[in-house]
Image: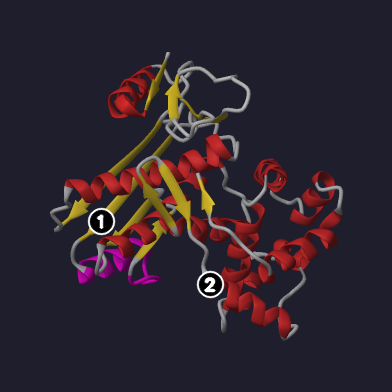
């Protein structure tokens, strides 16, 4: 079964309806024929010279028990904003689980609380965790909940929510991930923008400039030292220039840039979760034959080289 551009909207609707009702078996394909005409279908197109693309993952929904609950305090949360929140957080989970193949064994239920008044948000934070650690949002490990202020605009609020929501997704299954990987991924997803079924993870020039400057000034630790740091060492490195966040974000973005390095991410999550005492450099030594010294060279080349945004 296939459709050309003429009845595109109606056909995609039918395909998506089938896909969401039976995601395990339905698939969506797109191809362009030799005349430049775009077609869609539910089976791969094999005609020589036609370019076929599998869109199934792009339109996928989580295949396991996954939910996002958004509650608001003294804030009339618009339905469109709630939809954007749920869409962005769901896409974050899909990128981790379906696209990057990071396994999640348990049900993942994400809870997000949005305050309309910043003073009430700060008071709640102080009462809830005994101190104020953020003016915009924080992650409560106690309740595995993202708690945020609505911020000055929806875009800023969404950035904080996706950052903190990643922590809630992670804590469900991975409780022993080092700070650099945890915060590096949170910063990564903070820059997610969802357009229809496509998600774009933007580059962060600010973090890139910090890392470039640190490398030029010989102020950046070796990659081996950085990935083996404990939380205290991470906080100390982060004090003045936010170098810990910058290195964490750039290294995560680099690792997410290729299929080979995404496989390494899976092993970093899996092995560290199974053995909290193992050094991250030992995991890399085991699963990355080129070694961490070569990995650092590749990462630094990426920092100073040409980069492209990630699209899912």
Is-magenta flag for residue 120?
A: yes
Q: In the rendered view, does 249 fall on the left or right side of 22?
A: right
Numbered label attached to residue 157: none
Residue 310 in view here: yes
Q: Which residue is mark 1?
A: 114
Tell me the residue at 50%/57% (across/down): 186
Task: Say which element carries label 2.
Answer: helix
For this orientation, the residue located farthest to the front is 35
Q: In the rendered view, does 14 fall on the left or right side of 261?
A: left
Is-magenta flag for residue 123?
A: yes
Tell me the residue at 68%/68% (across/down): 305
Where is residue 271 shown, x and y percent of the image?
Answer: 71, 42
Q: Nearer the viewer, mark 1 or mark 2?
A: 2
Tell me the residue at 54%/60% (across/down): 183
Magenta range is 118-135
Q: In the rendered view, does 27 fall on the left or right side of 252?
A: left
Where is residue 122 shown, x and y percent of the image?
Answer: 28, 70
Q: In the rendered view, does 13 fall on the left or right side of 3?
A: left
User: If you read the primary sequence from the N terminus, does the residue marked by circle 1 or circle 2 appear first?
Assistant: 1
Where is residue 92 shown, x and y percent of the image?
Answer: 46, 45
Measure the C-alpha gap from mark 1 to mark 2. Answer: 29 Å
Residue 235 in view here: no
Numbered label attached to residue 205: 2
Task: Say which element carries label 1.
Answer: strand
């Amino acid at each position: 079964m296939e459709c050309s551009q003429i009845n595109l909207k109606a056909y995609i609707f039918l395909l998506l309806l089938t896909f969401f009702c039976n995601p395990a078996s339905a698939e969506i394909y797109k191809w362009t024929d030799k005349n430049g005409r775009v077609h869609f279908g539910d089976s791969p197109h094999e005609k020589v010279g036609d370019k076929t693309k599998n869109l199934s993952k792009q339109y996928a929904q989580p295949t396991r028990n996954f939910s996002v609950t958004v509650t608001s305090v003294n804030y009339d949360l618009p339905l469109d904003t709630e939809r954007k929140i749920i869409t962005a957080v769901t896409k974050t989970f899909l990128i981790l689980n379906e696209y990057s193949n990071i396994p999640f064994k348990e049900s993942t239920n994400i809870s997000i609380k949005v305050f309309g008044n910043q003073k009430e948000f700060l008071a709640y934070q102080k009462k809830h965790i005994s101190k104020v650690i953020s003016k915009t949002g924080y992650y409560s490990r106690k309740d595995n909940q993202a708690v945020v202020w609505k911020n000055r605009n929806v875009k800023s609020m969404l950035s904080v929510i996706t950052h903190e929501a990643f922590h809630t997704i992670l804590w469900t299954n991975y409780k022993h991930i080092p700070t650099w990987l945890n915060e590096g991924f949170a910063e990564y997803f903070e820059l997610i923008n969802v357009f229809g079924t496509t998600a774009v993870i933007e580059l962060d020039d600010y973090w890139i400039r910090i890392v470039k400057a640190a490398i030029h000034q010989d102020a950046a630790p070796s990659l081996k030292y950085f990935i083996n740091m404990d939380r205290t060492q991470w906080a100390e490195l982060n004090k003045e220039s936010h170098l810990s966040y910058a290195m964490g974000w750039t290294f995560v973005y680099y690792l997410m840039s290729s299929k080979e390095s995404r496989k390494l991410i899976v092993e970093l999550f899996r092995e560290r979760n199974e053995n909290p005492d193992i050094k991250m450099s030992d995991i890399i030594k085991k699963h990355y034959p080129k070694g961490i010294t070569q990995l650092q060279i590749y990462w630094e080349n990426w920092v100073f080289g040409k980069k492209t945004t990630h699209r899912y």
